[in-house]
Amino acid sequence: MGNLDTVKALYDAFATGDVPAVLNAMDPAIRWNEAEGVPYGQGGGEPWIGPDAVAQNLFARLGAEWSPFVVTPQRLYGDGDSVVVEGRYTGKFNATGADLDAQFCHVFKVADGKITSFQQYTDTAQFQKVMNAVPV
């Protein structure tokens, strides 16, 4: 399976709620970075390390706080160990009832069939508005 296929399979698994498959696609030492200013950010800019940290700090919250949170990849580009994905986030934030429709760009690094790093870029102002949140 090529790097584009690895990343596409991750989005397919996320879309069906198969979190174990999503986490299995990650290298045990994955470095996961949310966009600066997004309410789910790590604070201080340090990445989460490992699939468990991503699951606990991000995926659990997305599942509990949104009805639903949808990640729709629109275009995937690959070059060597890098995969770039353009797409949209949509969903309704439970606490405010507000809808989100924000573009994103994800940059992945893949080695030996596992995702070793993730960097998110998105419209953090939309997240803050919908979630009525203060950036970290």
Image: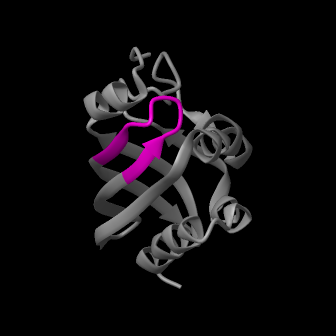
Q: As displayed, is residue 20 above or below residue 50?
A: below
Q: Residue at x 46, y 49 (%)?
A: 118
Vertically, is 9 above or below 42? below
Q: Is residue 65 magenta?
A: no
State the residue at coordinates (47%, 69%).
7
| Residue furthest to the front | 97
Q: Where 1 sits versus 97, above or below?
A: below
Q: Nearest the camera: 25 or 133?
A: 133
- The answer to whether one can see residue 36 in this image is no
The structure's colour scheme is one colour
Q: Quadrant of residue 124?
A: top left
Residue positioned most to the bottom: 1
Of 123 and 80, the residue lying toward us: 123
Where is residue 120 shown, x and y percent of the image?
38, 44
Query: Residue 93 magenta-drawn?
Result: yes
Depth check, front residue: 25 or 102: 102
* Number of residue marks: 0
Residue at the image point whose x is 55% and y is 60% from the top: 115
Instruction: Give x and y (percent) for residue 68.
Output: 52, 54
Q: Quadrant of the C terminus?
A: top left
Residue 76 is situated, as x and y percent measured from the top left of the image, at 30, 71
Residue 52 image position (x, y, % from top left): 74, 44
- The answer to whether residue 67 is visible is yes
State which region is magenta.
90-101
Q: Quadrant of residue 17?
A: bottom right
Compare residues 13 and 85 and report the one nearer the observer: 13
